[in-house]
Image (cartoon, rainbow, N blue to C red):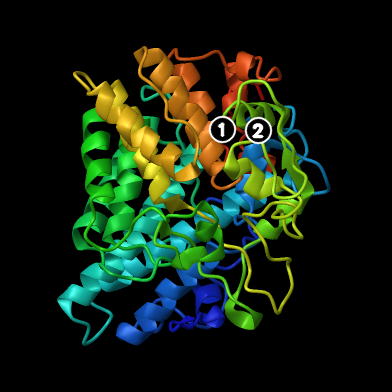
């Protein structure tokens, strides 16, 4: 396998994104010798800063949060000890959960590093770099900034309410001093995310390894953002463009190959690089501290046959093959979930964290097409059934729009469980759009206040302009 050719310079990244020791964790104060005057000098040094941005996405505090999100929703439960897991299974996450502060801080470290690189490139500090390469690096940094703002908004803001004032603190300039800023509105945050992704889609590199965020990744993420914003026509159009890409991204013929091929899969649009020894890993091996929910098991059972119960003995039978692949005795691997085969060992390849893959974009297209004014329900059904056909389960038939939307939500759960938390966000979005009642999906969801995590206690303490989320 091709080695990771752009190594991480950890000294450099810690120079621009050191761990917070001050009282305000919205801002990151550099502490080491390298300064803004000498860090970026040419293309090679700029690349090292960008490598550091990618490396921060694999840090402990951010790289296994999808497992928490799976517990918030109806994918599964956290069954063993996991940092910050208190309250996630029952949707009662306390304000004093220390892990939330680390999660929040870890994301703003990424944003601040992006802002530093953008600042230095736009100031012409990278001597000798071509305009094309400069544009590509800016695009990658802006993708990362957009993706991180999007995550923060979904975790700590009312992302589902476009008129809400409960957004997050937008950071678009590099910070070297403490500064308390209030939360931006949800609409303002989405506008910044859109602007960054539009630039990244237009200027990002093409034909890159799938652990880099190129132009296609920006288009894929933007289609998803449009779906969240209820810009359904734009979401459907852009998702279709991603599906019909010319860069060789395509659904794997065999579902299991997505995971055996890791970030090299033809289906994976963006996922962090992992490798043995010093290449670095995500923390997705902690999936062994989780298990599937009864809701997911029942849904998987309903996909095959009409009367027999599924079995997980051997290679599994009577279940949706995706569920069987993850959990049957023959395929669940040492972590108890076949999607993540590697234990957390120095010599192992490490598990891919699947941020974006093409199957999800098929389902973004299906939902956006079904929801848009004048949408073609047959076309939406067709995209849904392409995913079901690959999985080897019976195609759905069109009855009503409401049934189709529910089929799409369930399909996303079957396809993506324990990958990127999308099942949780779908519950929130569908509830907010009147397509379901959250408590009917998960009994512990008794209030809409539970749709948003509490602002971490140390954030509230360190920044008195921050208003706590409702109900906390």
> In the image, is 416 to the left or to the right of 124?
right
Provide residue 111's location: percent of width, then percent of height: 45, 57
Determine the image quadrant of residue 75.
Answer: top right
Q: Whole-Å distance between the Cαs marked 2 and 1?
A: 6 Å
> In the image, is 125 to the left or to the right of 165?
left
Q: How many labels sit on residues?
A: 2
Residue 469 seen in the current view? yes
Provide residue 298's location: percent of width, then percent of height: 67, 26
* Rendered-image quadrant of the C terminus: top right
Q: Which residue is mark 2?
A: 72
> Which of pointers 2 and 1 lies earlier in the amino acid sequence?
2
Provide residue 212's location: percent of width, then percent of height: 39, 67
**Residue neighbourhood size for the residue with mark 2, other residues' Cα within 10 Å, grouped as few (<14), some (14–19), many (≥20):** many
Q: Which mark is residue 424?
A: 1
Determine the image quadrant of residue 270.
Answer: bottom left
Which residue corresponds to the image point at 25% horizontal and 35% vertical from the top-left? 236
Extreme residue toward the left, this view? 131
Residue 223 versus residue 156: which sits nearer the camera? 223
Residue 108 versus residue 416: which sits nearer the camera? 416
- Are circles 2 and 1 on residues that touch, CB within 8 Å? yes
Which residue corresponds to the image point at 21% horizontal and 38% vertical from the top-left? 237
Residue 240 versus residue 326: which sits nearer the camera? 326
Whether residue 212 is situated above or below residue 224 in the rendered picture:
below
> In the image, is 359 to the left or to the right of 240?
right
Which residue corresponds to the image point at 66% horizontal and 14% vertical from the top-left? 446
Q: Secondary structure at mark 2?
A: helix
């Amino acid at each position: 396998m091709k080695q990771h050719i752009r190594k991480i310079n950890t000294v450099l990244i810690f120079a621009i994104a050191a761990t917070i020791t001050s009282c305000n964790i919205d801002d990151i104060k550099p502490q080491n010798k390298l300064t803004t005057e000498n860090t970026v000098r040419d293309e090679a040094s700029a690349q090292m800063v960008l490598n550091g941005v990618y490396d921060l996405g694999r840090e402990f505090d951010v790289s296994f949060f999808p497992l928490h999100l799976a517990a918030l929703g109806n994918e599964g439960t956290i069954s063993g000890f996991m940092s910050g897991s208190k309250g996630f299974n029952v949707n009662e996450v306390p304000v004093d959960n220390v892990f939330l502060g680390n999660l929040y801080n870890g994301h703003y470290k990424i944003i601040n590093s992006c802002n530093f690189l953008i600042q230095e490139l736009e100031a012409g500090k990278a001597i000798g770099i071509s305009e094309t390469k400069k544009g590509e690096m800016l695009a990658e940094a802006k993708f990362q900034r957009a993706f991180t703002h999007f995550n923060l908004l979904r975790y700590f803001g009312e992302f589902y309410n476009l008129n809400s004032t409960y957004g997050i603190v937008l950071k678009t300039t590099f910070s070297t001093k403490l500064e308390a800023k209030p939360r931006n509105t949800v609409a303002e945050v989405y506008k910044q995310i859109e602007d960054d992704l539009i630039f990244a889609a237009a200027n990002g590199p093409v034909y890159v390894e799938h652990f880099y965020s190129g132009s296609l990744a920006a288009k894929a993420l933007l289609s998803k953002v449009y779906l969240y914003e209820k810009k359904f026509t734009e979401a459907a159009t852009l998702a279709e463009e991603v599906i019909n890409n010319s860069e060789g991204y395509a659904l794997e013929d065999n579902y299991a190959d997505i995971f055996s091929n890791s970030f090299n899969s033809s289906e994976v649009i963006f996922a962090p690089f992992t490798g043995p020894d010093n290449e670095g890993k995500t923390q997705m091996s902690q999936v062994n501290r989780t298990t599937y929910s009864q809701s997911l098991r029942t849904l998987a059972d309903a996909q095959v046959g009409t009367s027999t119960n599924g079995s997980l003995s051997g290679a599994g039978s009577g279940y949706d093959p995706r569920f069987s692949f993850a959990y049957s005795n023959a395929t669940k691997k040492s972590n108890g979930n076949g999607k993540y085969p590697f234990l957390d060992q120095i010599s192992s390849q490490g598990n891919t964290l699947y941020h974006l893959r093409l199957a999800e974009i098929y389902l973004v297209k299906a939902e956006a097409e079904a929801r848009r004014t004048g949408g073609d329900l047959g076309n939406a059904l067709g995209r849904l059934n392409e995913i079901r056909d690959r999985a080897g389960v019976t195609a759905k038939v069109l009855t009503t729009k409401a049934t189709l939307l529910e089929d799409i939500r369930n399909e996303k759960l079957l396809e993506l469980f324990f990958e990127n938390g999308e099942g949780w966000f779908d519950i929130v979005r569908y509830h907010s759009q009147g397509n379901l009642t959250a408590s009917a999906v998960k009994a512990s969801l008794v209030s809409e206040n539970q749709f948003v995590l509490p602002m971490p206690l140390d954030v509230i303490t360190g920044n008195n302009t921050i208003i706590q989320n409702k109900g906390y």
